[in-house]
Image: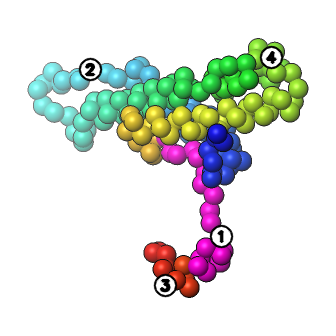
């Protein structure tokens, strides 16, 4: 069985790497899923509500809940990846993208010493993670603004034979 059949694999791999390494994506999820920013409601001793608009505590709790759910989805997706000698996807994701270890240390830990051998395993780990993450995000109903679908779809070129067939038979694509 081919992993992510019909998807653009190179773009998917780049999306996964960008997800972990871009400061606005996974590092932000990790920071905002921490509970250090949550405070109990503060009442004014005068009994008069301050001039601040909105409910900051409520917004903070909602954001915390959304990012905690997103962090949990990433953790479940990593746990759903392979952890065998042939496909050490869990270890690669944890060591390279979460812990940020050097490639020489990672290669030694997973017993993949050749560059091409390691990069094939890394690519497979990224593809497997993208597949697992989408399934987990769907089940947990994670906000797509926090974790977008990392799988890059192949786009069909216009003017292909399939389009000509549809036109000849009178079936047209909806736009």
| Residue extending furthest toward the top | 109
- Secondary structure of residue under mark 1: loop
In the shown orientation, is residue 141 left or right of residue 6? left
Is 89 drawn above or below residue 23 in the view shown?
A: above
Mark 2 or 4: the one toward you:
4
Q: Nearer the viewer, residue 48 or 142?
A: 142
Q: Earlier in the sequence, mark 3 or mark 1?
A: 1
Quadrant that contains the N terminus: top right
What's the residue at 59%, 79% (across, down)? 165
Q: Earlier in the sequence, mark 4 or mark 3?
A: 4
What's the residue at 87%, 30% (across, down)? 115
Residue identified by numbered label 3: 170
Give neighbour class at mark 1: few <14, some 14-19, many 20+ (Cα, 10 Å). Answer: few
Q: Are marks 3 and 2 in contact (CB under 8 Å)?
A: no
What's the residue at 63%, 58% (across, down)? 154
The residues colored magenta run 147-165
Mark 3 to mark 2 CA distance (whole Å): 64 Å
- Secondary structure of residue under mark 3: loop
Residue identified by numbered label 4: 111
């Amino acid at each position: 069985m081919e992993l992510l059949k019909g998807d653009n694999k190179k773009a998917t791999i780049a999306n996964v790497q960008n997800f972990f390494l871009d400061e606005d994506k996974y590092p932000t999820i990790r920071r905002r899923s921490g509970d250090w920013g949550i405070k109990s409601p503060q009442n004014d001793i005068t009994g008069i509500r301050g001039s601040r608009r909105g409910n900051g505590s409520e917004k903070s709790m909602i954001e915390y809940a959304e990012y905690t759910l997103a962090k949990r989805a990433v953790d479940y997706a990593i746990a759903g990846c392979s952890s065998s000698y042939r496909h050490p996807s869990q270890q690669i994701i944890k060591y390279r993208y979460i812990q940020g270890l050097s490639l020489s240390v990672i290669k030694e830990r997973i017993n993949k010493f050749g560059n091409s051998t390691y990069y094939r395993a890394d690519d497979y780990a990224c593809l497997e993670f993208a597949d697992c993450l989408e399934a987990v995000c769907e089940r947990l109903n994670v906000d797509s603004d926090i974790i977008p679908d990392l799988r890059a779809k192949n786009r069909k070129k216009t003017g292909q034979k399939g389009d000509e067939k549809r036109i000849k038979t009178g079936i047209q694509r909806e736009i």
